[in-house]
Image (cartoon, rainbow, N blue to C red):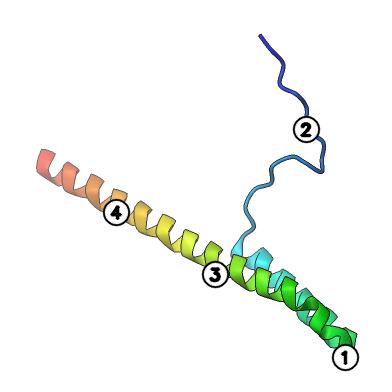
Amino acid sequence: MTARPRQSWATRPLPPLTVEEIEGHLDLLAELMQLAGRKADLYLPLWRRSQLELKKRKETDAILAEARARLTRSKDQTAARSA
């Protein structure tokens, strides 16, 4: 059996961020932008990327919830037909 190479803490895969985590990051960015004054523009790329990630995470969560609901309905219908 071949051993898997170990990954460093910097290159290991991370779990996806939650909506709450991304919103917390946006809160922090907003504070940093406020403190930066005239240089707040420097944070715009991070702000835009965070908003994009938030939108994608919400969309993913909605799709997963829809899939779970569909599976539940399907199981309920199958059980009703079997009874």
Distance Cα–Cα, label 3 vs label 1: 28 Å
| Amino acid type of the residue that numbered disc 3 sits on in the rendered structure | Lys
3 in relation to 53, above or below? above
Give the numbered dot on residue 28.
none
Residue at screen point 36% across, 53% down: 67
Neighbours of disc 4 within 10 Å: few (<14), some (14-19), many (20+): few
Distance Cα–Cα, label 2 vs label 4: 38 Å
The residue that label 1 is drawn on is 38
Name the side, left or right, on which 68 lies relative to 53. left
Distance Cα–Cα, label 2 vs label 3: 30 Å
Distance Cα–Cα, label 4 vs label 1: 50 Å
For discs 4 and 1, the disc positioned in front in the rendered view: 1
Rendering quarter of residue 62? bottom left
Sequence-first disc among 3 and 1: 1
In contact (CB < 8 Å): disc 2 and disc 4: no
Distance Cα–Cα, label 3 vs label 4: 23 Å
| Amino acid type of the residue that numbered disc 2 sits on in the rendered structure | Gln
The residue that label 2 is drawn on is 7
Sequence-first disc among 3 and 4: 3
* Callout 2 secondary element: loop
29 in relation to 9, above or below? below
